[in-house]
Every structure is written in structure tokens, then in C-alpha cells.
Image (cartoon, grey):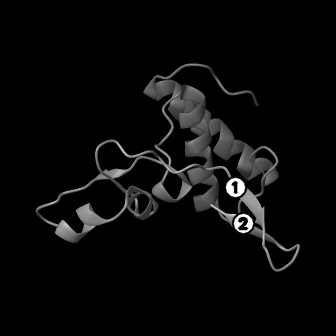
Amino acid sequence: MPLKKGSSKKTVSSNISTLVGDYKETGKIGTSKPASKAKAVKQAVAISLGKAGKAKPVKLKQGGELKAVDAKAKPGLAKLPTEVRNKMGYMKDGGDVMSSKVTYVKKKDGNRRVKIC
């Protein structure tokens, strides 16, 4: 069934109900097959919030928002290079968010490709 447009709680709730109902009938949400009803509900919530434009922020592992550095609480952290802090999920003075792009580089000792995140 098509999802409704809108960002109100009522619309989001209706979309979640529609997706969970589809899961109960067919065992699928779209083209995916969640293993359990709990996972289907989580996926339905994510889809509905995304459709409403209220999606949850991206997690740090996936290049999301960075945490601020508290130099008094963690003095050693403030001394680390920006690149290292960013990999750990911290920033200082507006550090860049990690790129979600994956690049490949050829090793010098052979033609094997190495993934660099």
C-alpha cells in the first residue's frame, strides 16, 4: 500500500501501521524480509520517519555528527591531530565530518587493492 505524505504524528503512525500490516500479510517490507516482527517494526519506523523528513541523525561510524572536545576533562584528547579525533568521533574548532566515501589504493608490493576509509 502506498504511504501517506506529511510529517504529522498521525501520518507517521499511519504509515508505520501500513508497513507492519504489509509485513504481517507478506512477510516483507518493500523488498526486504526482516527476521522478526520487532525488526520489521524498527524498519517501518525508520521508513516512515524518513518519508516524513524526520529521520534520525546518522551514527558516528557512518560519518555523522562529531562530539565536541572538552579540554579540561580530557586534556590528552585536545592534543591529538584533527584526523585522529575525527576518527574517534570528536572535533575541535569545527573539524570536518568523516567522509562516507570509500577509496581504494594500490599497494606498492603488488596489485592488491586496500580499502581506506
Camera-nearest residue between 36 and 115: 115
Toward the left, the furthest residue is 72
Name the residue furthest bottom.
109
Q: Residue at x 22, y 70 (%)?
A: 76
Q: Position of residue 19 (x, y in %)?
A: 67, 41
Mark 1 element type: loop
Instruction: Specify whether 44 is left or right of 56.
Output: right
Name the residue at the front extreme.
108
Q: Position of residue 78 (x, y in %)?
A: 24, 61
Which residue: 72% across, 56% down? 103
Who's the residue at 50% across and 23% down the image? 7
| Image disc number at residue 115 | 2
- The residue carrying mark 1 is 102
**Residue under the image location 61 percent in, 19 percent down:** 5
The answer to whether the residue labelled 1 contacts the one labelled 2, judged by CB atoms less than 8 Å apart, is: yes
Residue 9 versus residue 63 in the image, above or below: above
Label 1 and label 2: CA atoms lie apart by: 7 Å
